[in-house]
Image: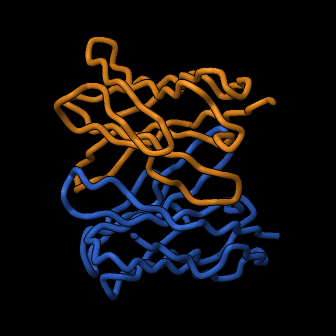
Chain colours: A orange, B blue
Amino acid sequence: AQSVTQPDIHITVSEGASLELRCNYSYGATPYLFWYVQSPGQGLQLLLKYFSGDTLVQGIKGFEAEFKRSQSSFNLRKPSVHWSDAAEYFCAVGPGRHGNKLVFGAGTILRVKS
Amino acid sequence: DVKVTQSSRYLVKRTGEKVFLECVQDMDHENMFWYRQDPGLGLRLIYFSYDVKMKEKGDIPEGYSVSREKKERFSLILESASTNQTSMYLCASGPSLDRGGQYFGPGTRLTVT
């Protein structure tokens, strides 16, 4: 069965520091992988996605993620965090049996200290 | 830009009431989804629909039903609300192609008292 693990429930980084959020997945075939961000009280916004090809993908807001098949990982990175990046981040894997059905991780809450 | 709207941002209902949550998307997407979000549990899929009048159960369908009479509208129904259904409900839509990802509405925070 598909599953996604985000090992860190909370992460705190200083503004301007680099960031890496971890995501490990379990999937029987080549996965489609996604990172979403959720600001307080809002819905989820798609940051980036991986389907095939270059294993380093660029997204919005200066984020990137790297797909490592050997480690079943899809970690999200940002070289310099801004206070506005404070939010909850979700990793997701698909597709499911129908179209783009996704399985989500439990999320990582990012706090940014000034 | 894709727009997914939900009928209410906040809703308070009493135990036993029938509750309707409405979701509308404007991108002609085939797929629509209802999730509930609870702290520490991430998003859990309640139901999804891959075509008008078509639906499939997700991971936690008990206590819920859905309706999709038009392509742009997907409704979640709580037949008899209970306190354990207090949660954030998120609607999403996406194209039928696997690569499309999903686009989310702002969510409805439902409190059942």
Look at 63% across and 60% down and name the residue there. Answer: A42
Residue B69 in the figure: left or right of residue A13: left
Q: Residue at x 50, y 43 (%)?
A: A61
Quadrant (top left/top right/bottom left/bottom right) for the N terminus of chain B: bottom left
Q: Residue furthest bottom?
A: B69
| Horizontal and vertical percent position of residue B14 | 79, 77
Q: Residue at x 63, y 41 (%)?
A: A88
Figure quadrant of residue A47: top left
Instruction: Check the image and report above or below for A77 versus B27.
Output: above
Q: Quadrant of residue A50?
A: top left
Lateral position of residue B67 relative to residue B22, left or right: left
| Of B92 and A78, the residue lying toward us | A78
Residue A100 rendering spot, x and y as whole percentages: 28, 53
Q: Which quarter of the image is occupied by the C terminus of chain B?
A: bottom right
Residue B72 relative to residue B98: left or right: right
For residue A79, above or below residue A48: above
Q: Give percent across and percent down for residue B68.
A: 36, 81
